[in-house]
Amino acid sequence: MDRRMRKTRKAIFDAFIELLSEKDFANITVGEIIEKADVGRTTFYAHFETKDFLLKELCEELFCHIFDAVSEEKPEHNHIFECDSSDSVFLHLLRHLQNNDNNILKLLYGSNNELILRYFKSELLQLVASQQDLFEPKKSEKIPDSFRINHIASVFAETVRWWVDNGMKESPETIAEYFYLSV
């Protein structure tokens, strides 16, 4: 993707994030998005087939740079949001949440949270599956892997919710420690 295309995508994402923080997803129109992003309708549709596809792509951009960082296939870790971190992947994610990169907290826990959380949880499931060795010492043969992976992902999502609901007073390192001790 060339620089101009990335800039246009980012403008559309930024406009969409702002609108999502103001109103329900169902009430946002493509017209509002293109007006706020200052792009033409044809340009919008050249990048995204529908508003739903835009939401899916936004969630992938918000989460994939973190989740891709642990993949041996995509070690470059560069998407529309750049960073460089050698932390554990869960601590890395918590730091992004603490920084509230691209108003992610407002998206995760705002009025549209069920839509965003569905994508977040989907990515978490894949992440936990790829990081099972971190949880190996507590593994029980009585529990199926699919249940265990779902449980760990759910615990992480709820840990984040608890942290946000309590004003994020603890450091990401402390929250990561709580998470590892609880699963």
Image (cartoon, grey):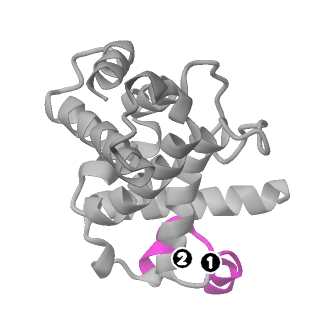
User: Which part of the image, by quadrant, shows the N terminus?
Assistant: bottom right
Q: Which residue is mark 1?
A: 48
Label pair 2/1, CB-CB below 8 angstroms: yes
Q: Residue 153: x percent and y percent? A: 37, 44
Q: Which residue is mark 2?
A: 53
- Residue 162 at what x, y percent from top left? 18, 34
- In the picture provided, is 58 more to the left or to the right than 113? right
State the residue lying farthest toward the right.
Answer: 2
- Give the residue furthest to the left: 166
Magenta stretch, main secondary structure class: helix
Q: Secondary structure at mark 2?
A: helix
Report the span colored magenta.
Answer: 32-47
Is-magenta flag for residue 95?
no
The part of the image, by quadrant, that contains residue 32 is: bottom left
> Which picture quadrant has residue 89?
top right
Q: Identify residue type, mark 2.
A: Phe
Residue 166: x %, y % from top left: 14, 28
Report, in whole angstroms, how far the alpha carbon at label 2 lies from the one at label 1.
6 Å
Q: Say which residue appears at 45% left-offset and 57% top-offset.
A: 122
Neighbor class of circle 2 (other Cα within 10 Å; few <14, some 14-19, many 20+) is: few
Q: Quadrant of the C terminus?
A: top left
Between discs 2 and 1, the one toward the N terminus: 1
What is the tally of numbered marks visible in this picture? Answer: 2
Location of residue 101 in the rendering, given as x and y in whole percent from the top left corner: 46, 37
Residue at image point 62% right, 56% down: 10
Q: Is residue 6 above or below residue 128?
A: below
- Residue farthest toward the front in the current orientation of the protein: 142
Q: Nearer the observer, disc 2 or disc 1?
A: 2
Q: Secondary structure at mark 1?
A: loop
Compared to 127, does 10 lie above or below? below
Query: Residue, x 34% and y 45% (percent of image)?
Result: 143
The amino acid at mark 1 is: Phe
